[in-house]
Image (spheres, rainbow, N blue to C red):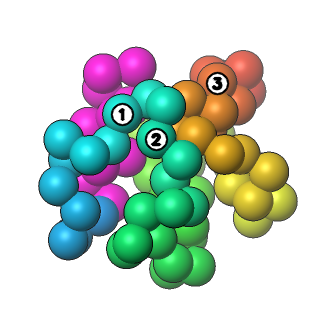
């Protein structure tokens, strides 16, 4: 999970990585946008070989939700 948190946090330019924890509701982060959603989808593919869809991101609430989804598809 720690490595995933680092990869997830690296997608954000303005949000301090310390704000991103597994229980963080990522869509409530001020910087969250559709462009960041695409970055997360690309990160999942690049680092974990998992193809996420927009619906996957929309249906997840926390960083941990995304982590669990990606890990279940590896």
Q: Are marks 2 and 1 in contact (CB under 8 Å)?
A: yes
In the rendered image, the vertical position of residue 59 relative to residue 66, given as above or below: below
Residue at point 30%, 26% (across, down)? 3
Residue at x 39%, y 72% (from the top left corner):
30
- The residues colored magenta run 1-11
Quadrant for residue 4, please give it: top left
Tell me the tag on residue 24. Answer: 2
| Label 2 element class | loop
Q: Nearer the viewer, residue 40 or 60?
A: 60
On the rendered structure, is 37 left or right of 32? right
Tell me the residue that label 3 is attached to.
Answer: 68
Q: Is residue 48 visible?
A: no
CA neighbours of label 1 inside 10 A, class few (<14), some (14 to 19), many (20+): some
Q: Quick one: SS at disc 1?
A: loop
* Residue 7 falls left or right of residue 68: left
* Residue named by callout 1: 21
Report whether 18 appears left or right of 23: left
């Amino acid at each position: 999970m720690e490595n995933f948190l680092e990869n997830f946090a690296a997608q954000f330019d303005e949000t301090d990585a310390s704000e991103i924890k597994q229980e963080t509701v990522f869509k409530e982060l001020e910087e969250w946008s559709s462009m960041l959603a695409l970055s997360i989808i690309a990160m999942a593919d690049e680092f974990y070989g998992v193809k996420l869809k927009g619906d996957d991101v929309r249906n997840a609430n926390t960083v941990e939700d995304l982590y669990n989804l990606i890990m279940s598809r590896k």
